[in-house]
Image: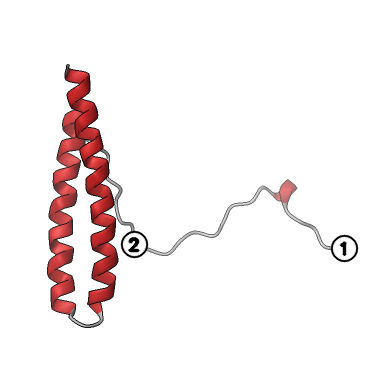
């Protein structure tokens, strides 16, 4: 029974993700005409995302790792000298 409830909750989260993607698509269309409306919709999307995360954490039984936005200058790619292309 508990497994069925968790599966239903996961299905609900998936439907909600699909709905959010449609909302974000609409925000992109509205942003040019009404930046204020797009901003308010974006704020609501953040709230919905937090609710989804809370639901996912409840199903998983553990906190969800959130990605951090990183700022800065990217490093130069490291390449093994033996693998570098050598022009003749």
Residue 4 sits in quarter: top left
**Residue 77 horizontal/vertical position (percent):** 57, 56
Dividing the image into 4 quarters, which one contains the N terminus?
top left
What's the image's color scheme? secondary structure
Q: Nearer the viewer, residue 49 or 64?
A: 49
Residue 17 seen: yes
Q: Secondary structure at mark 1?
A: loop
Dividing the image into 4 quarters, which one contains the C terminus?
bottom right
Q: Secondary structure at mark 2?
A: loop
- Name the residue: 23% across, 76% down: 31
- Name the residue: 27% across, 39% down: 65
Q: Is residue 85 left or right of residue 13?
A: right
- Name the residue: 13% across, 45% down: 51
Look at the picture and state if 36 lies above or below 53: below
**Residue 10 horizontal/vertical position (percent):** 24, 34
- Crowd around label 2: few <14 · some 14–19 · many ≥20 (10 Å): few
Q: Which residue is mark 2?
A: 71
Look at the picture and state if 19 lies above or below 1: below
**Residue 30 horizontal/vertical position (percent):** 23, 75
Question: Marks 2 and 1, how far apart in space?
Answer: 39 Å
Question: Would you say the residues marked 2 and 1 are in contact, meaning their CB atoms lie under 8 Å apart?
Answer: no
First in sequence: mark 2 or mark 1?
2
Residue 61 seen: no
Q: Which residue is mark 1?
A: 88
């Amino acid at each position: 029974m508990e497994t069925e409830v968790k599966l239903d909750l996961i299905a609900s989260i998936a439907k909600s993700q699909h709905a959010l993607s449609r909302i974000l698509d609409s925000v992109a269309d509205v942003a040019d005409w009404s930046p204020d409306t797009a901003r308010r919709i974006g704020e609501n999307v953040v709230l919905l995302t937090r609710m989804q995360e809370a639901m996912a954490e409840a199903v998983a039984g553990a906190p969800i790792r959130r990605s951090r936005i990183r700022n800065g200058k990217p490093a130069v790619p490291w390449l093994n000298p033996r693998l570098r292309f050598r022009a003749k």
